[in-house]
Image (spheres, rainbow, N blue to C red):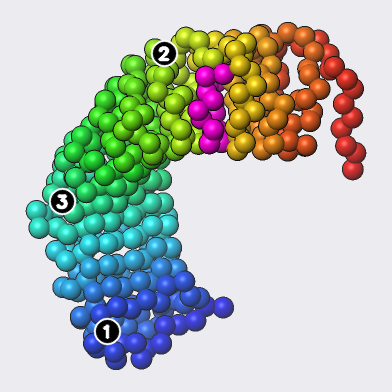
Amino acid sequence: MNLEVPIDVSLMRRLVTLDLSDNALEIENPNLKMLLQNLTGLRELYLDGVQMSSAVLNFFANFSHLTTLSLSGCDLRGSFPDMIFQLPTLENLDLSYNQLLTGSIPQFHRNASLRTMLLLSTNFSGPLPNSIGNLSMLSEIDMRNCSFTGPIPSTISTLTGLTYVDLSENFFTGSIPSFYMSKNLQLVDLSDNSLSGSIPKSLFGLPSLQILRLSNNQLSGRVYEFSTLHFPHIVALDLSRNKLEGQIPKSFFTLERLETLKLSYNFFNGTVQLGKLQRLHNLVELDLSYNNLSIDTSITNTNLSRFPQLFSLSLASCNLHNFPDLTNQHSLELLNLSNNRIIGEVPNWIWEIGNGTLVDLDLSSNLLVSLQKPYHFPTY
């Protein structure tokens, strides 16, 4: 049962911070304006999870000292007022997980103070204005799973303080900004859009980058090398489901902290020797499926046993002729070797991987003839 916010809150006129988040509260009677209209000195307001579907939000623009407004998961509905984005004191805005909240991003003035702008899983739409480049203090922007359209403004590349950019699951078109001045960027996620053109070389020159996700776009051309000397922090790289071509950069297989490498459904070519992946000892997920690759398992096969955390291995349609040796894998749960040219019998160790950790096995569309020994599936 939801509880109402006590009206006595409105009498605390000297409040500068109010946090009622993560409670079973709802704002019905008194309404939001009655509750907060006397708290004109508020600087930080956290109402995350407070149910306020009928709240009218325009009056927030009257809080001239407000630096933080956090309204995540409040069941907000209707159109969010542009003027709140433009509050000159506002530094942190969180409207995430309000799926029925609509709105667009207005023009920003040069004196804007926004540092974080979290709109994920809302129904905001329309283009991003070029004036987003005026947000010189902006550090974190998360607009994933919205309905934004048009190009990503190139002015976002001039924001030197950016550390986190997630614009995934939208309808953005055009090319990827270079982010050439954003030397502090740790995460870039532009996946699940309609971006085209090549991947800017500058993305492979960001010294703090940890996560790069560009999957499910229309990106094309060759991919640049990372310099392992300057990129010790990369943990996740996902370029899958694009139109990228050429050989996979050698540096991708020397990123020692790499946990996820997903390059499937592109046009990469050449030969990949699995034995040369031995430096990726933190690898959790490897997917090279559906390219124009040939996987060579003949050299130092047993190096694959050096991946103690390997959870998922997908080498479908990789011109494999033999099984990679996975005898000592203890964490593997997904193995996909389908659509290859593997000949002969299925080795016994397939059934013994991780003492039964394997839950998804695909060996379809090969040239297998029989099991090496009968395997008895458990009965229940």
- For label 1, the residue is 15
- For label 3, the residue is 136
Residue at the spot 40% in from the left edge and 77% down from the top edge: 20
Q: Position of residue 121 (x, y in %)?
A: 41, 51
Q: Name the amino acid type tagged 2.
A: Gln
Q: Position of residue 62 (x, y in %)?
A: 18, 73
Number of on-image labels: 3
Q: Position of residue 212 (x, y in %)?
A: 38, 35
Per the image, label 1 sits on a secondary structure element best described as loop
Residue at the spot 33% in from the left edge and 16% down from the top edge: 221
Per the image, label 3 sits on a secondary structure element best described as loop
* Mark pair 3, 1: CA separation: 29 Å
Q: Are the residues tagged 2 and 1 within 8 Å (C-beta)?
A: no
Q: Name the amino acid type tagged 1.
A: Leu
Per the image, label 2 sits on a secondary structure element best described as strand
- The first of marks 2 and 3 along the sequence is 3
Residue at the spot 34% in from the left edge and 53% down from the top edge: 119
* Mark pair 2, 1: CA separation: 60 Å
- For label 2, the residue is 247
Please provide the residue range marked out in magenta: 275-290
Q: Residue furthest left?
A: 110
Q: Quadrant of the N terminus?
A: bottom right
Is 136 part of what is drawn in magenta?
Answer: no
Of 376 and 119, nearer the camera is 376
Q: Is residue 375 left or right of residue 354?
A: right
Q: Is residue 143 left or right of residue 67?
A: right
Can the viewer see residue 227 in this picture?
Answer: yes
Q: Quarter-wise, where is residue 308 in the image? A: top right
Q: Position of residue 34 (x, y in %)?
A: 30, 83
Relative vertical location of residue 104 with respect to residue 177 in this rendering, above or below: below
